[in-house]
Amino acid sequence: MPTVPHSPEGDPSAPAPSAPHTSSVPASRPLSSGAVSATTIVVPPSIPMVSLVGSADEILRLVERELSAHVLVRGNEIVITGSPADNAFAVRVFDELIALVGHGGHLRPDAVSQALHMLRNGATERPADVLSLSILSRRGRTIRPKTLNQKRYVDAIDEHTIVFGIGPAGTGKTYLAMAKAVQALQAKQVNRIILTRPAVEAGERLGYLPGTLYDKIDPYLRPLYDALHDMVDPDSIPRLTQAGTIEVAPLAYMRGRSLNDAFIVLDEAQNTSPEQMKMFLTRLGFGSKMVVTGDVTQVDLPGGQRSGLRVVQSILDEVDDVAFTHLSSVDVVRHRLVGHIVDAYARFDAEQSEDQQTGPRSTSQRPARRGSAPPRR
């Protein structure tokens, strides 16, 4: 995006400020020490300023909270005042946001935060390229990756026959895999979609639930149906299911089959045994693609049984056309608290592991939690 040096105050050649849109957001942090200069970004006429700065300047305020520079909007110009390094970073941020709007994207606070995170961490991919990728569109709603790791996960699905998506809850592992499955079906790359889960229950037993076997299993597979309803016309799902174009079934139903010309998604794979994982992977037939998703921190297998998802990477890590993609709390796209919860449990698990190796620490050695009272003496 073209940038030109802004004329300093008092210079008679400085242009008069434009009247249509003027917005100044107070900086949330002091300007960096050193020389202060101003840089002007001229926004192309094809980019609506309200799309760039947000309703009531919501996006603009979010951006400046993360910048070490003052930002002033005058008409279709954005004036950035700060140190040369701060200005250069701010220009990169606005260039990416302008590109996102130019691709037809709607700037949301979470997308802006992700763009800032990627730029600050020196990602090789451009935020505009990552956040503008579209997988599916239905009823005005577009399904797309929302983080860099999600984009790499989607790219891995395009480039490999078997892909493992491993990460905590809320990182979009299953949802994106199902979106890619529906995309492949619509593009006639496959003839059917198979969605499966291991029938392992979190502290419950299916045999004690009322109803037929279908009645017992159906609620357990319901999350897969719910995701399908976001991607396919709900009225067509019974017809597609009856025709075998879409199949949702427990993992045990995969045994003895050869799955050709299919896009197969195994969800909750942390609840497979190593033997079940081997059984599933060897169902792969000609013209098929497999995506395996799971969270190794939420294993429900009884009796301390090993998880097939935990051991599979050490077994298949050097096999061609198999990819492993890891997501983290940074990639959580649910409520912001979910990411904090994932991190808190990770710290707790690390402490527990340390205690098992070195012995439990005394209360005085444990880090105090915020808001907690000091220990009694």
Image (cartoon, rainbow, N blue to C red):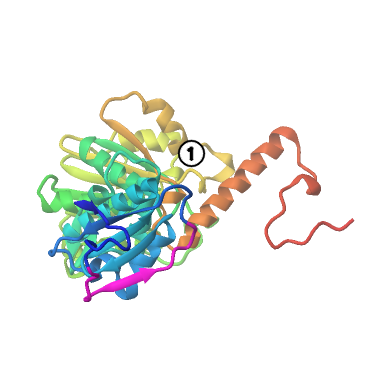
- What kind of secondary structure does the magenta stretch mostly adopt? loop
Q: Residues within 10 Å of mark 1 (few under 14, many from 20)?
A: many
Q: Residue furthest left?
A: 188
Tell me which segment is drawn in magenta.
Answer: 16-30
Q: Position of residue 195 (x, y in %)?
A: 29, 51
Relative depth, front residue between 131 and 2:
2
What x and y, as percent, mark residue 144?
25, 55
Q: What amino acid type is highlighted by mark number 1?
A: Ser
Q: Secondary structure at mark 1?
A: loop
User: Residue, x 36% and y 57% (percent of image)?
Assistant: 81
Residue closer to the observer: 287 or 71: 71
Q: Is residue 324 above or below residue 74?
A: above
Q: Is residue 312 magenta?
A: no
Picture coordinates of residue 239, whole percent (x, y): 16, 64
Q: Looking at the picture, tell me which residue is in the foreground, 244 or 288.
A: 288
- The reply to whether residue 224 is in sight is no
Query: Is 171 rendered above or below residue 18?
Result: above
How many marks are shown on the rendered structure?
Answer: 1
Q: Which residue is mark 1?
A: 307
The residue drawn where x is 16% and y is 66% is: 236
Left/right of residue 243 with respect to residue 283 in the rendered view: left
* Camera-nearest residue between 77 and 178: 77
